[in-house]
Amino acid sequence: MKKIFIGAAFKMNKTVEESIEYARNLNIFIKGHEEGLEGIDVFILPTFLSLYSFFKLLSGSKLKYGAQNCFWADEGAFTGEISPMHLKKIGCTFVELGHPERLNILKEDETMINKKIIGCLQNGLKPILCIGEEKERMDREEVNDFLKKQIKGYFKNVKTEEVNNIILAYEPVWAIGADKSASAGYIHDSLVFIRDFLDSEYGKNTGKNQLIIYGGSVNPKSAFEILKLDSNNGIFIGRAALNYDYFISIINMAIEASNRKVLKYNKKSVK
């Protein structure tokens, strides 16, 4: 059985009180569906203000949580930044890095993200690293070249044995906030390329063992087919997951998909 991750990032939404209520209800749901959720990890990334409350609320829970960003150093004169060491000490498992909103609005670059990845790994945190091409109408070779360059830049100085501790979130920038996600065949082609590239760069089975999830305008219509892809390990949702019932529906789809045979595509492009 392949490992499946279903995650939500709240972006700059939900007050502490609203986040706690969401987490409390989600925790109750998970406790009531433990058998069906075998092999499925559910996580949420609230705002920083909610994380210590989650630490107290979710201690010992199967529901995981983390941050939507961090700094690269553990401590020092970095006014306003958040230490990965501090995040680990309050029970965080994940840190989202490299989201296009941070690249475009806050001007983060490849070097900064690379340093953050290494800082997270040194503290036993799992980076959820967002990657993906910017333009929709690129041919497959252009997409592959873009992903290759992005991964090589972000993974600079990452130890080979640490690569599989990074979760890749494949999020084509053109699909984020759009009316629909990329097609299942298009997603599969990208994920197969990523896995093959990791094998060539870091050794056999690195790509096979890599956790890769998809994000970008997932809806109930597309989610089930995406979840069944043999190349995919889950779904990462943004604004849509602010609706609790919607997020539960995606978790239920993951439970259903995990009990069915996965869809297998040839490496040749499927439209």
Image (tube, rainbow, N blue to C red):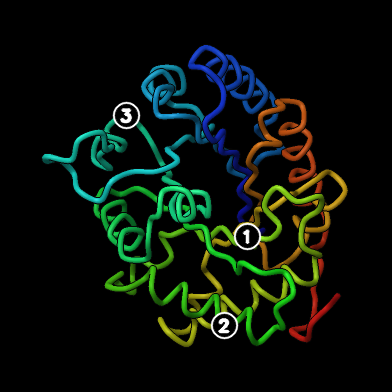
Please give left or right for residue 141 compared with residue 159 in the image. Answer: right
Q: What's the residue at 43%, 60% (across, down)? A: 166
Quote the CA–CA distance across marks 1 and 3.
Answer: 31 Å
Place of residue 108 in the rendered image (x, y in percent of width and height, measured from the top left) = 38, 55
Instruction: Tell me the residue that label 1 is attached to.
Output: 173
Q: What's the residue at 46%, 29% (across, down)? A: 47
Q: Secondary structure at mark 3?
A: loop
Q: What's the residue at 61%, 67% (across, down)? A: 134
- Of the residues tagged 1 and 2, which is closer to the observer? 1
Quadrant, the C terminus: bottom right
Instruction: Tell me the residue that label 3 is attached to.
Output: 90
Instruction: Give the answer, above or below, for where 184 lies relative to 100.
Output: below
* Residue type at the position of mark 3: Ile
Quote the CA–CA distance across marks 3 and 2.
Answer: 36 Å
* Residue type at the position of mark 1: Val
Place of residue 82 in the rendered image (x, y in percent of width and height, measured from the top left) = 28, 37
Instruction: Tell me the residue that label 2 is attached to.
Output: 196
- Of the residues tagged 1 and 3, which is closer to the observer? 1
Seen as rendered, the residue at the extreme top is 17
Mark earlier in primary sequence (1, 3)? 3
Place of residue 87 in the rendered image (x, y in percent of width and height, measured from the top left) = 31, 36
Q: Secondary structure at mark 1?
A: helix
Say whether marks 1 and 3 touch (CB < 8 Å). no
Instruction: Give the answer, above or below, for where 175 lies relative to 64.
Output: below
Instruction: Give the answer, above or below, for where 214 lies relative to 14.
Output: below
Mark earlier in primary sequence (1, 2)? 1
Q: Secondary structure at mark 2?
A: helix
The disc at residue 216 is none
Say whether marks 3 and 2 touch (CB < 8 Å). no
